[in-house]
Image (tube, rainbow, N blue to C red):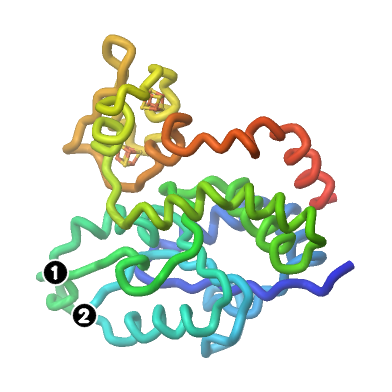
Amino acid sequence: MAEKITVGHVHMSGCTGCLVSLADNYEGLLTILDKYADLVYGLTLVDVRHIPKMDVALVEGSVCIQDKCSVDEIKETREKATVVVAVGGCACYGNITRFGRGGQPNQPQHESYLPVGDLIKVDVYIPGCAPCPQLIRNVCVMAYLLLKGNQEQQELAKKYLTPLMQLAERGTEACGCDLMYDVVNQGLCMGCGSCAAACPVRAITHEYGKPNVNREMCIKCGACYAQCPRSFFNFDVITEFEGISELIKGALQ
Ligand code: SF4
Ligand code: SF4
């Protein structure tokens, strides 16, 4: 077996819920750490004080630009990591920190929070609040295949990761309105309801077979658009769903 990849968890202005989601893979996480990845950084779990070089950085949380340490840390992460993954709505889109506007003790000047992609180049997005444990797991396995696998495995990993890389290229803003602008307004909505099922705050209802977003409730996590089968439907991968599921299941045994 090829050597393991090195992975770090970088905690910016997040709630640790994304890390809990990773841990919610239970034995799956232990197998990943056993066979495929060494956790070389992560202040919650590893006693390493400074960011080391690593293959994959899993970044959680947005960046407070009035906090110099945070700004330095995210820039250093980009320098030290081969692949930067924004994990969760805050890192990808700002999420609830989009509503931060300072004025609270004891750092009233901490008022501006930006998604990671506004400060550094991000390679892969895993949206969601909290992001799905299985998706974080799959990205870890695919990152291993991409960096250490044979040519066939590398091709598969690239195919799998492409939509999540396209999400990263698409930008750092998310809102339930994305469904209107980029799906319904484009004549693409088929009324499947996946967006409503994905919304963690139930801001989406279905009326007359189409989504209706309550903008007052939306926390700007990006889950609905990412989950919509009319946003990024990667036929190459989805049509091979069973094979890929078997591969990941086999990898985790
Ligand atoms: S998930 Fe996409 S296609 Fe399905 S109802 Fe929502 S907007 Fe329409
Ligand atoms: S509508 Fe719901 S799922 Fe979509 S961005 Fe807002 S909170 Fe997230």
Instruction: Please give the label number shown on residue 172.
Output: none
Judged left or right of residue 178, residue 46 is: right
Question: What is the C-alpha distance between the residues marked 2 and 1?
Answer: 10 Å
Residue displayed at 47% across by 56% down = 125
Residue displayed at 48% across by 84% down = 79
Residue 27 at what x, y percent from top left?
75, 53
Q: Badge 2 is on which residue?
A: 66
Q: Is residue 48 above or below residue 138?
A: below
Where on the picture, by quarter, is residue 178? top left
Residue 70 at what x, y percent from top left?
34, 80
Q: Badge 1 is on which residue?
A: 102
Residue displayed at 55% across by 76% down = 42
- Does the closest atom of ligand 2 sit within 8 Å of the Cβ of label 1? no
Where in the image, quadrant-wise, is ligand 2 located? top left
Verify CB contact (< 8 Å) between mark 2 and mark 1.
Answer: yes
Around disc 1, counting alpha carbons within 10 Å, would you say few (fewer than 14), some (14 to 19), or many (20 or more)?
Answer: few
Residue displayed at 58% across by 87% down = 52
User: Which of labels 2 and 1 is toward the front?
Assistant: 2
Judged left or right of residue 150, residue 234 is: left
Of the pair 14 and 87, the residue shown nearer to us: 87
Report how many numbered discs are placed on residues in the image: 2
Of the pair 63 and 243, the residue shown nearer to us: 243
The amino acid at mark 1 is: Gly
